[in-house]
Amino acid sequence: MGYKISVERVKSSRIGEVDFNNLPFGRHFSDHMFMADYFDGDWHNCRIIPFGEYSIHPALSALHYGQAIFEGMKAEKDEDGNPIVFRPSKNINRFNISADRMAMAQMPEDLFMQAMDKLLTIDKDWIPSAPESSLYVRPHMFATEEFVGIRAAEHFRFVMFTCPVGAYYNRPVKVFIHDKYIRAFPGGVGFAKCAGNYGAAMMPAREIQKMGYDQILWLDGIHHKYLQEIGTMNIFVIIDGVIITPGLDQGTILDGVTRDSIIQLAENEGYLLQERDISVDEIINAYHEGKLDDMFGTGTAAVLSHIGEFHYKGENYELPPIEGREISNKLKERLTGIKSGKAEDIFGWVHTVPVGVYSGS
Ligand code: COI
């Protein structure tokens, strides 16, 4: 715990301006944010300040060469009103894996946790309590070198802010399986939560959204055949009672925290689960044989979101009604129960923010 975090509080809170019964995703921001700057090989000036704009240099290297990464976590309140966060140590671990791939500075876990705990203590009243709502925590880091030549930066800024949010999707998701554009390939950055992965997906996503779909379900970059992920979520398929999700071994998909939790919950429930390649032909054959029971996505923002329909090469395939999808409904119920502190946390996933430690600062 070598880092000291200073605190400057807002003069007056904006919380009264927000309708907590109507929370679109990512549109409202709580009162404070954490910020720190990396130079001379360490993090400096660790501070919690009022949420707001800051100025940047026009030659800021992240803007030109894309060294930028982020994470997403969710805070809720347990039955005693204490802020809790779901598996934040998985997020800081993945953040540093992304940082390594993007030649960026490592964020020490103790600084990350201290910043998060302190920020959530100060802004705990911003944690919504309506079903499916939470306080989304967005840590991110970007290169701040003021230099136009191309090389790995040595200066970075880390910022963590929070947003009260409702459900990311409020109806079954319509996915478009693309046979033209590619998100990731072995040796690339598919496993990293870097801004460029999302930026490169914007144009194909905008095209399919104009056609009435929500998201692309990406195929692998070599064979254009195997499912990878949905960009906002990891993908799961249930064929004839067996849960199948693509493995992480190629380094082309994100090691989702929710993905990992669903795998562990499925195993704990005694369901058959396989982490393996799954081709688009396999799901279409299963569909025609009446064995495609379910498809769903998982992610921090999206939690477990059912897929209502998928499109491939000019054909739409409609999936069974949500109410009958017993396995995924059961897994979602267990996951949301644990995340909200209502169900027993047999895995030790829930981090309780030690408000007593930070409330005086
Ligand atoms: C998350 O689930 O945290 C993400 O970063 C994905 C995005 C849809 C918000």
Image: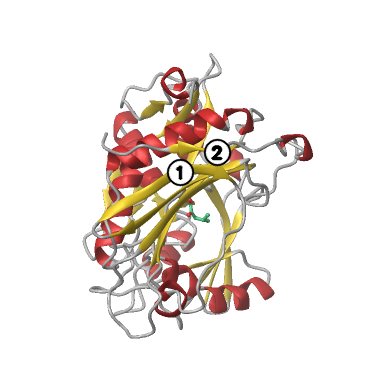
Q: Is residue 135 left or right of residue 34?
A: right
Which type of secondary structure does the marked residue at label 2 adopt?
A: loop
Percent position of residue 31, x then y: 63, 40
Q: Residue furthest top?
A: 80
Q: Earlier in the sequence, mark 1 or mark 2?
A: 2
Disc 1 residue lies near ligand 1 with CB under 8 A: no
Percent position of residue 64, x then y: 44, 80
Q: Would you identify the image quadrant in which residue 289 lies? A: bottom left
Percent position of residue 231, x then y: 46, 63
The residue that appears at 48% across and 55% down in the rendered structure is 290
Q: Would you identify the image quadrant in which residue 209 lies? A: bottom right
Q: Is residue 354 left or right of residue 110?
A: right
Q: Is residue 77 visible?
A: yes
Q: Residue furthest bottom?
A: 149
Colour convention of the picture = secondary structure
User: From mark 1 to mark 2, how far is it between C-alphas?
Assistant: 8 Å
The residue that appears at 31% across and 71% down in the rendered structure is 153
Which type of secondary structure does the marked residue at label 1 adopt?
A: strand
The numbered disc on residue 177 is none
The residue that appears at 33% across and 57% down in the rendered structure is 38
Q: Would you identify the image quadrant in which residue 335 lies? A: top left
* Residue denoted by label 2: 8
**Amino acid type assigned to the residue bearing label 2 in the image:** Glu
The numbered disc on residue 47 is 1
* Residue closer to the observer: 159 or 38: 38
**Amino acid type assigned to the residue bearing label 1 in the image:** Arg
Q: Are marks 1 and 2 in contact (CB under 8 Å)?
A: yes
Percent position of residue 88, x then y: 37, 38
